[in-house]
Structure formats: C-alpha cells, structure tokens
Amino acid sequence: MKLLLDIKDSKASDLLQILRSLSYVTTSHISDEKLSLINEVEEAAEALKMTAYQGKYKDRSFRGH
C-alpha cells in the first residue's frame, strides 16, 4: 500500500524517524512536479465525480468510486 501524507514541516522529521525505524516501511520524497501532477489528477477526478453525480455523465461504466 502506498500513502501520501501532508505533514507540517515542523513535525515531518519526527514522523519520518519513526517510520524509518520500522523494517516493513520504506519512505521516499516526491518532487514538487510530481506533487503538482498528483494534485491536478485528484482535482480532475473530483470534477468528474461531481459531473457524474449531477447526471451529466452518461457512460454507464462509471461507478463513482
């Protein structure tokens, strides 16, 4: 499972230290460009979901999740 966390800078190093101490957890940083892309995709998915809920999306394969 992959998780993306938004953590205050002042708390990030403490949490990273804890996470890195767990043998079954790996951590990595993502670039600002990747973060921007992730945010854009999330916004587009939310917009599509809202359009579907408003009944404007006619494709029957869309399930809204």
Image (cartoon, helix red, strand yellow):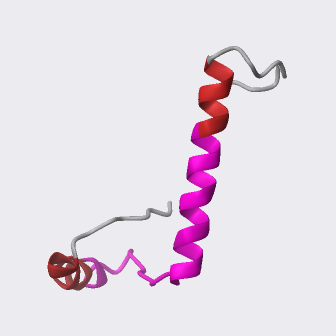
Is residue 43 depicted above or below 64 in this figure?
below
Is residue 35 depicted above or below 20 in this figure?
above
> Dividing the picture into quarters, in which one does residue 8 lie?
bottom left
> Dividing the picture into quarters, in which one does residue 17 lie?
bottom left
Residue at 67% x, 35% y is 48
Residue at 38% x, 75% y is 25
Can you see residue 64? no
* Relative image position of residue 7 (x, y in whole percent): 26, 69
Q: Nearer the viewer, residue 63 or 53?
A: 53
Main structural element of the magenta stretch: helix, strand or loop? helix
* Relative image position of residue 32 (x, y in whole percent): 51, 81
Q: Is residue 33 magenta?
A: yes
* Relative image position of residue 20 (x, y in whole percent): 30, 84
Residue at 44% x, 62% y is 3
45 with respect to 14 (left or right)? right
> Dividing the picture into quarters, in which one does residue 6 lie?
bottom left
User: Which contiguous range is marked in magenta?
Assistant: 19-46
Quadrant for the C terminus in the image = top right
* Relative image position of residue 23 (x, y in whole percent): 34, 81
